[in-house]
Image (cartoon, helix red, strand yellow):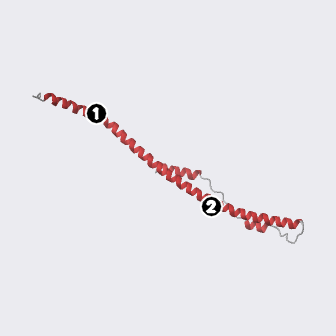
Amino acid sequence: KSRKLGRSVERESNRNPTPVLEDDSEEEEGAAPDLSGLSGDGAIFSSVLAAVQAMGSTLGKHMKALEKKFDDGMRKVNARIDRLEDQADEIADAVEGQRAMVRQVASATPSIVANAQKAAQGTDSIKDMMPAPP
């Protein structure tokens, strides 16, 4: 659990916040002077300005949609990372358990060997005490 918590805290501290687009469409609409009464270059400028504002609005909508998809994707990736980290923790715990069992067997083996040798010596002693077969 402590490994998982440590990785989670580290990931949160390293995570960069997703840039958020500010909605400035109201400012843009109000910022353009009324050039509708102009002719010639003023009319061209007015129509170009309106087209740029429309493109900006469309671009803003698309950027917000992309931002949402990116955030959703990052949530999925982070969930997968969490699952993989949980599996790695389970594997590490299982390996540590196996190591502990190996250490127990290794520490018990010398006494098992010594007891087996004593038993063999005892068997030999009993065999020597037995009368010879007829």
Judge whether 7 appears above or below 43 on screen.
above
Judge whether 65 appears above or below 82 on screen.
below
The quarter of the image holding the C terminus is top left
Residue 70 percent across, percent down from the top left: 62, 57
Residue 93 percent across, percent down from the top left: 42, 47
Task: Give the residue at x 55% y 54%.
Answer: 78
- The residue lying furthest to the bottom in this view is 37
Crowding at dot 1, Cα within 10 Å, few <14 / some 14-19 / many 20+, comes out as few
Structural distance between the alpha carbons of marks 2 and 1: 67 Å
Residue bearing mark 2? 68
Q: Secondary structure at mark 1?
A: helix
What residue type is disc 2 on?
Lys
- The residue lying furthest to the front in this view is 134
Task: Give the residue at x 41% y 44%.
Answer: 96
Question: In the rendered structure, which disc, 2 or 1, sits on the residue that comes first in sequence?
Answer: 2
Task: Give the residue at x 36% y 39%.
Answer: 103
What residue type is disc 1 on?
Val
71 on left or right of 2 = right
- Label annotation for residue 113: 1
